[in-house]
Amino acid sequence: PSANTTAQARGTLLGAALGDALGARFEGEDVVGGPSLVAHDRAAEPLRYTDDTAQTIVLARHLVQRRDRAPVDEDALATDLARAWQAEPWRGYGAGSRQVLELVAAGVPWPEATRACFGGHGSYGNGAAMRVAALALIATSLTHAAQLADRTAKVTHAHQHGREGAELQACAVFLALHSDPVRPLDRDHYLDELSRALPSTSWHGRIDQIRAMPPTASPSYAASLLGNDATAIRSVPMALHSFLRYPDHPAEAIRYAIRAGGDTDTIASMAGALAGARTGIHGLPVTWLERLENADRIRALADRLAPRIPRT
Ligand code: 8NA
Ligand code: MG
Ligand code: MG
Ligand code: MG
């Protein structure tokens, strides 16, 4: 791998982990004030990540372990996720994911377990979208990124919106990764490509809302339009907007996402993956990386996946 692909793989996974770990302390708060964020930003204590990163690691490791075989094995992935939950149930899993993984751990096949969730509708939470970053590293096209995302999403999220949120985030990371870092990101072209990648109309309205957002929109104003909760349709768009606001400054994209409140760890994690994919690890603050829990393990996984980033 070139120095650049290694830097970008690291930026993708560590950007996701940093957003999660920085946002975790504010999860569920309506408004996150600048001063409390600044204090947290500059503190010296370790940055501990949550379920978002725990599951991102599971997916990255799954891809590494499968090497030359088909990259995603749904049954094995469901088991891997269930084991990670069993090993660290205190990471802060969503209620639906917890229920599914508990059933899978007890031997229930995932197609049945996922349908048992939310009165048979399946989850439309953002839990499948928040963990997809590594898929963008090995995807060979936008369509491939969406396919891989759907295959990994459905083992916990049966609802169409939960799955499509994962597709959108994986496609968005893929495009960020393959964007030309020397030129300013073409926001309209980026959103056009995403619209084309997502056949379902329920997401097109969201993408149009991102496009129409005034360049100076405050985080709370953006959240009032795009949402900031733990559902996929009301969080992936906010993460995308945060990235498009600061495509070349992962720390600013992460701070903006956190200041929007609500599902701060998850939205900041998705924004961090997007911006980190574009800038590479050099865009991430060293002071944050030094505080991040298990940063070495995450970096090592990125280094295993970097050679698989296709040349475009
Ligand atoms: P999930 O499946 O529980 O979905 C997240 C939430 O979305 C649910 O708890 C429901 O409120 C809502 N939801 C999803 N599907 C439906 C449905 N069919 N009908 C009605 N409501 C629905 O779990 P997940 O893994 O998708 O969620 C990921 C989130 O959980 C992330 O934010 C992650 O950080 C973690 N988490 C979230 C919170 C929070 O909600 N503030 C707190 C701790 C942890
Ligand atoms: Mg979390
Ligand atoms: Mg589909
Ligand atoms: Mg969350």
Image: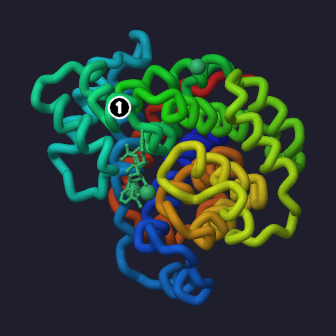
Q: Amino acid at mark 1?
A: Thr
The residue labelled by disc 1 is: 156
- x and y percent of residue 274 in the render? 64, 47
Q: Is residue 4 visible?
A: yes
- x and y percent of residue 8 in the render? 62, 43
Q: Is residue 67 left or right of residue 135?
A: left
Q: Quadrant of residue 206?
A: top right
Residue drawn at x 89%, y 46% is: 183
Residue drawn at x 52%, y 60% is: 19
Mark 1 lies within 8 Å of ligand 1 (Cβ measured): yes
Q: Is residue 62 left or right of residue 261?
A: left
Which corner quadrant of the figure contains ligand 2? bottom left
- x and y percent of residue 166 in the render? 54, 34
Q: Toward the viewer: 85 or 214? A: 214
Q: Quadrant of residue 304?
A: top left
Residue drawn at x 41%, y 27% is: 158
Quarter of the image where the N terminus is located: top right
Q: Is residue 1 visible?
A: no
Q: Secondary structure at mark 1?
A: loop
Q: Toward the viewer: 4 or 13? A: 13
Quarter of the image where the C terminus is located: top right
Residue drawn at x 15%, y 32% is: 105
